[in-house]
Structures are given as C-alpha cells and as structure tokens.
Amino acid sequence: MDTLKKFELMEKIVRELEDLQHSQQAIIQKLGKIEVDNIELGDTRLNKDLPDMHQRVSDNLDTIVGILEYFADKTQNFGNKNNVDALKEQEAIKGVNGQ
C-alpha cells in the first residue's frame, strides 16, 4: 500500500472512531433519560439492569476515546513524517495532467 493510500485509510479509521464515540455518547444520554423516567415509574428490572448497562457503555466510551486519541496522533505523525500534503499535491497535479 502506498503512503498516501495508507494515510487516507488511517484518516477514515479516525472518522469511524469519532462516529463510534458519538454513537456511544448518544446511547449514554438515552440510558440516562430512561433512568430518569424510571425514577417516577419505579420498575424493578429497570432499576436493576440500567445502572450496569450505563456503566458498561461508559467503560466502552472511555476505551474508544483512548483509542481515538492514540490513533489520531499516530495518523497525524504519519502524515507529518511522510509529507502527505506534498503527496496530495503531486496526486492533484497528476490528475490535472491526465497522468
């Protein structure tokens, strides 16, 4: 895999991790709303299971955030080390010239 394609794939993974992070945050918010609604309702099964679900999703979010920070830094460093901006310019010039 050439350098530019590798960098583009790394950027794609960063975007997917960001999307996963946002999805997990949305799940936490929904669980919180259900927990608040259940305060009034008082369903025992929800009282029992929702806090555990909330904790597991929160733990997953922490893991995702850590992976995202690591991989975003790795991607940025790879781009800087391999002068990806110059490679993108070369690709653009080749595209304009029909090469």
Image (spheres, rainbow, N blue to C red):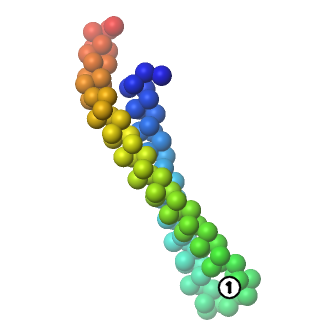
Residue drawn at (54%, 69%) of the image: 58
Q: Is residue 8 visible?
A: yes
Residue drawn at (32%, 8%) of the image: 98
In this view, the residue in front, 12 or 70, is 70
Residue type, mark 1 in image? Asn
In this view, the residue in front, 50 or 96, is 50
Residue holding disc 1: 47
Q: Position of residue 77 (x, y in %)?
A: 33, 39
Q: Is residue 24 visible?
A: no
Splitting the image into 4 quarters, where does residue 7 fall? top left
Q: Which image quarter is the C terminus in?
A: top left
Q: Position of residue 32 (x, y in %)?
A: 55, 77
Q: Is residue 97 left or right of residue 56?
A: left
Q: Is residue 52 left or right of residue 67?
A: right
Q: Position of residue 91 (x, y in %)?
A: 31, 19
Image position of 66 with respect to 83: above or below: below
